[in-house]
Amino acid sequence: MRRTASGDAAAFRALADLHVSKIMNFAYRMLHDRAEAEDVAQEAFLRLWKEAGRFEGKAKVSTWLHTVTHNLCIDRLRRRREKPSPEAVDEARSSHEPGGLLDRKRTAAVVEEALAHLPERQRAAITLVHYQGLGNLEAAEVLGVEVEAIESLLARGRRALRAALADVAKEQGLR
């Protein structure tokens, strides 16, 4: 980060290369729109470049990037009032078509759809911990809450996901 702060483009590229896939995945899971996720990731890395000199090192770079990405995603979700884009709906629908993708992809699409319907804080907590691999402490830093709050968000989110997935299983006659 110090080298990036001094304008070292190679150091910035190394940081971006290290974190870009996780940031993109996090943004996509929050927004369910690839184009918006790319825009958010680009904005997060632009902020990293511009604000590297103000980075105090109190948190890891990955925590800082996830926090910036989370805030950008929340701003976008609020602007569109949580309405999924037509592309996200079509993508989820196409994974259920007969003769389409493998069962594993269908299951992933069902989980993604259930995740999309969680309240934004529960969705963020589950995404940060289960998809991004952050620990509860780092996820709490990203969301600006105490560890106990993350644990509560995770528990409520998991219960809601289990219920949603049980409903889908019943609909498909799997139980």
Image (tube, rainbow, N blue to C red):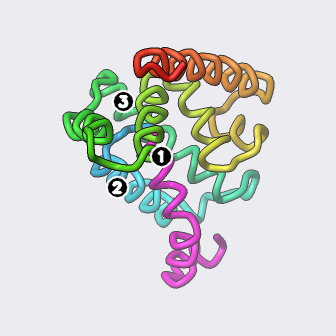
Residue at image location 76% in from the left, 44% down from the top? 135
**Span highlighted in magenta in the image:** 1-29
* Local SS, label 1: helix
When asked about the image quadrant of residue 41, the answer is bottom left
Q: Is residue 90 left or right of residue 51?
A: left
* Local SS, label 2: helix
Q: Is residue 131 above or below residue 117?
A: below
Going by the numbered disc 3, the residue's amino acid type is: Leu
Q: Is residue 19 magenta?
A: yes
The local crowd at label 3, few if under 14, some if 14 to 19, many if 20 or more residues have their Cα within 10 Å, is some
Q: Give x and y (percent) for residue 90.
A: 22, 37
The disc, 3 or 1, on the residue closer to the chain's N-terminal end is 3
Going by the numbered disc 1, the residue's amino acid type is: Arg
Measure the alpha-carbon separation of dots 3 and 1. 28 Å
Q: Which residue is mark 2?
A: 38
Going by the numbered disc 2, the residue's amino acid type is: Glu
Residue at image location 73% in from the left, 22% down from the top? 149
Res. 118 visible in picture: no
Q: Which residue is mark 1?
A: 104
Q: Which residue is mark 3?
A: 77
Viewport quadrant of the N terminus: bottom right
